[in-house]
Image (spheres, rainbow, N blue to C red):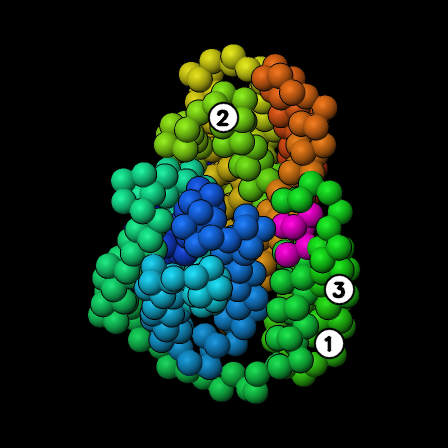
Amino acid sequence: MNDVTMTVSAEPFSSALRRSVGVVMIGASLSFLDSTIVNVAVNTLSVDLRAGLGTVQWVVTAYLLALAAVIPATGWAARRFGADRLYVAALAVFTVGSVLCACSSSVGMLIASRTLQGVGGGAILPVGTMIWTAQSSKAQMGRVMGLIAVPIVLAPTLGPLIGGLLIHGIDWRAIFWINVPVGVVGLVLARRLLPRTRGDDAGPLDVIGLILAAAGIVGITYGLTELGAAGAPDPAALVALPAGSAAVVGFVVHALRAERPLLDLRLYAGRGFTAASVAQFALGAANFGGMILMPLYLQTVRGDGVILTGLLLAPTGFGALLSAPLTDRYGAGITAFTGAAVLVASTIPFVFLTATTPYLLLCVVMVIRGIGFGLSIIPAMTAAYGALPPDKIPDATPQLNVLQRVGGAIGTAVLTVVLTGQLRHHGTPSGQAGAFGTAFLWVLAITIAATLPTIVLAHTEHRAHRRTPASEEAS
């Protein structure tokens, strides 16, 4: 079986696939970078635009909510208008939104512009994934998913660094202007290089499903984000969270009854796709939730600036890139389990953080954690796509993106609440380091829990491999 795996994994990308990968990577990188690049500008925006921090925080929140709300409609829109046209439209909206953000003279205009930017940014990666997978064989899927991981992993590490450099060197408007030339180049290349696809009869848009899905995702994302940011019960978040949950339940009931639902939830009837989807959700909580703690530790306990913090976070992205060639060497299930186990092992040292933990040790462990990230979440996504026929990819892609984002939001909210509660009781650097150690203990528990669906995934994959030779002998 290993010989077969190695031979299949060596299948080269076609020239068309290579061109699509390069083009989509431009838009995906912009979308994910803008999820984090603005975080370091909040204080500066508050001063320049004469607005309170609570109001300015909506510059970040509005983008994330718009990003989440648009995802459910991407599958239907790609079938209706063609994936290449939708990608170009999404990148154009994102680029125009960036121009408006840079030209904003008030916090209200900036929030509205960020919302428009998020509408475009939310469609870029799901549609780009559809373009890639439509040109890939199942043997190439692991490497394709590994490439998708690049902007996902690098954004949390490079975003604050790039944002800090631009703000210190120019001003806050530069973090938006930088998107414009890159976006224009991406648009020109997309028009010339992406494969042309014709829109099909996607049927009427499931408006009820879209409203319920968007309301549910926005309500849950907003509720979790605000609860995490506040560190204490917030009235708006306490309303948004149950309302969003109710909308999701309503969407599930509607989707199972509708003749042509916005998203096909019957995909979860397959054990392989279900296991891979649960793994995607759980690993999103473990990975993205854990990512928020290190920059806070470096700035709060160690007193490091934004630029140094960004440099010290880079090893995580480097580790993920190192893992990319390994993501399709063996079965997706066993690889995801191995990656989750590496994540567990590399999280343990963070439980024992002190105010003087050597930077070299932190960097080494972050490289290992990045490897675990790459070896876990990307093979889980590969397994999800591998369990489906090609015509179901447009239905699966939005759902997997939502699961990953909601999982990350839950992990982030839980860990922020835990950390805030611990920091209230510790004023000295050593005590604060202990607070972060406690928070990482929660990360460890979440990561251990995230290994459970990968075990199911590996077992399901193993049983499938055992049945395949038996079927071939019988025939």
Visible in this render: residue 305? Answer: yes
- Indicate the amino acid at tag 2: Leu
Residue 34 pos. (x, y %): 42, 52
Q: Is residue 58 above or below residue 413?
A: below
Q: Residues within 10 Å of mark 2 (few under 14, many from 20)?
A: many
Which numbered tag is attached to residue 376?
A: none
**Residue topped by disc 3:** 243
- Tag 2's secondary structure? helix
* Dot 1 amino acid type: His
Give the residues drawn in magenta, as a range: 222-227
Q: Residue at x 49, y 26 (%)?
A: 298
Q: Residues within 10 Å of mark 1 (few under 14, many from 20)?
A: some
Q: Earlier in the sequence, mark 3 or mark 2?
A: 3
- The quarter of the picture where the C terminus appears is bottom right
Residue sitting at x 30%, y 71%: 195
Give the residue pinned by disc 1: 254
Q: CA distance from mark 3 to mark 2?
A: 36 Å
Spatial CA distance of label 3 from label 1 is 16 Å
On the image, numbered disc 2 is attached to which residue? 298
Q: Is residue 11 visible?
A: no
Task: Work out whether mark 2 precedes mark 1 in sequence or the reverse, and give the earlier one.
Answer: 1
Return the x and y of residue 155 as percentages of the image width and height: 42, 45
Q: Identify the residue at image location x=62%, y=81%.
A: 207
